[in-house]
Structures are given as C-alpha cells and as structure tokens.
Amino acid sequence: MYMNKEEKRPFPKTQLDSKDISVITHQFHSDCSSINSKLRSITTNNGNPTTATTPPPPRRPNRHCHRRLPRHRPRHRRPPLLPRRGPRHQLRLQRSLRAESLASTLPRGAVTVRADVSIASEVKALFDRAEEAFGGRPAHVLVNCAGILDPKYPSVANTAEEDWDRTFAVNAKGAFLCCREAAARLVRGGGGRIVAVTTSVVGSRRPGYGAYAASKAAVETMVGVMAKELKGTGITVNFMAPGPIATDMFFDRKTEEVVGSVVAESPMGRLGEVGDVAPVVGFLTTDGGGWINGQVIRVNGGFV
C-alpha cells in the first residue's frame, strides 16, 4: 500500500486480470517493433544508410526449466608453503596496494610521506610531517623497516661496488639517520620506542646475501649501543630479526626450486608471513614491552 504524498490518501489498489496483462504485453512488443524500425533507418556521417544492430527481444523465462545455476564457491586461502604467484604477480600486488589506501583503513587517522631514508634532509622532513599531522606533539614510536636486497644474489667476490654501496646506503645509513632523528625527537620520560627490523640471515649466513647480511649486522650493533646511550630517557631500542617472509623482496627473481629449498630448511615447513611478524613489533611498542631493551628478537619459526 503506497501513500499519495500531497493528499496523504492511499492509492487505490489496482488489480489486473489476465486479459489486461495480455493487452499490455501486446502493446509493449508493438512499441519495440516501432523503435526497431526507426533504428534501422539510421545513417552514417557520410549519408550512407546502414543497418543498426539491435539486440533481440528478451526471452521469456521458462517456468518449467529447473536447471540449477552454479553456486558461488568461496576462494579459500592458499596454504603459506608456496604462496600463489604468477609472473610479475608480486610486482602487480605491490603497485595495487598503495600506502594511501592502507592509511585510510587505519584507526584514528594516518598520513603517508614518501622519503629516501638514505638522505638526512628527507628523514628530517618525514618526522616534521608526522609531528605536524598530529598537532605538533612528539612521536612515540619509530619502526625502521626500510631495506633493499640485491636480487642477483651474488657472492661477496662477485658483488659490484655500486651494489654494495647502495645496500649499505639504505639498510645501514638509512637506519642510522632514522634512529638518530628518533633519539632526538621521540617523547622522553617513558613511552618512546625504537624498533629496527633486521634479518635472521645475519645468523644463518646464507650464501648470496653478503652485502645484505653485513648491512643488517651493522644495524644490530648500532642498536645495541644506542640502547645504552639513551639511558635515562625512557626510550627503548630493540631490533627484530625475521626469517624468510613471503614478501615481494623475498620472491624477487627466485625460482620455485630456490623457494622450495628455503621452505625445506624451516622446522615449521613453510615461509613466514607478515602476520607472524607484525604482532611482535606491536608488542615491543606497547607498555608491556617497556622492560625489553637492547635485545634482538628473532622471529623466524626456528630457521636460525
């Protein structure tokens, strides 16, 4: 029952019998035929007549047909042994998951800032933007996880000098610049947290990771020293060393055989995932992690 908006009276309920429905249906098809005949007279820009392609009239559903439509099958999550990835899959995934989209899903707001951590001025601008976005208050937490890896996996003897320098510029110098800025600008008196993400390759010493492992080992030494130097500030400094994690950087230029060999070395029989690592980092930044300082936390499923 619908109401007339102006007069606020109910519309009379109309009942149609089968004859009325037949007349309406006949009139509808007559109108469609008239429209189709007009469409066929459409001409092109040059004035040459052409025949317009018109879709056929909709087929009436067959009430006696009981064919079942295929049911939607939910996509189940693939076991993390060898994550699903085709050619360039990881690259496409990285480009599709923009930082802005992630920031919009975080509670209490978030901002994204693009910076090269190997340049001191850009690191300073990164902290400036963060403080500006949250009312000029000092930051509480720095999680330094920027890092690069030479995808050629050369031996130390075959590592190019420019590749070595670039790896140390981002991994070691970048961590130094970020931690130095954080030591001067994080909140004092309790609650300040610095977490540097390194790697368990420092302990496994896997061939092909010479520059990468050396750069991360330098960060681990620096972080241990900083934990003592910041005595009295209430700022804790730790480093978290994950094992092989199913990320873009791990899969870059690795064959299935290489990935399988890495999985075989893990006592857990699979690669790690971001969800295995993030909760540990989160705990180190909370009040519950306030008594953990100057430590290396290896989150690798027993890989090392």
Image: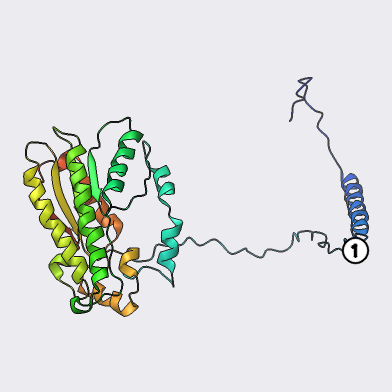
Determine whether 95 is above or below 251 in the image.
above
Residue 200 in sight: no
Q: Closer to the camera, 102 or 68?
A: 102
Q: Closer to the camera, 94 or 84?
A: 94
Image coords of residue 131 (percent x, y): 30, 35
Q: Residue at x 27, y 43 (%)?
A: 124
The quadrant in which residue 244 appears is bottom left
Q: Closer to the camera, 128 or 133?
A: 128
Which residue lies most toward the top here? 7
Q: Quadrant of the N terminus?
A: top right
Q: Is residue 14 left or right of residue 232?
A: right
Q: Residue at x 89, y 65 (%)?
A: 51
Q: How many marks?
A: 1
Q: Closer to the camera, 203 or 6?
A: 203
Image coords of residue 107 (percent x, y): 37, 39
Q: Quadrant of the C terminus?
A: bottom left
Q: Residue at x 43, y 52 (%)?
A: 98
Q: Residue at x 28, y 70 (%)?
A: 150
Image coords of residue 71 (percent x, y): 56, 62
Q: Is residue 303 left or right of residue 91?
A: left
Q: How is the image coloured?
A: rainbow
Q: Residues within 10 Å of mark 1 (few under 14, many from 20)?
A: few
What secondary structure is found at the residue carrying circle 1?
loop
Residue 116 in sight: yes
Determine whether 138 is above or below 23 in the image.
above
Image coords of residue 55 (percent x, y): 81, 62
Task: Identify residue for label 1.
Answer: 46
Amino acid tagged 1: Asn
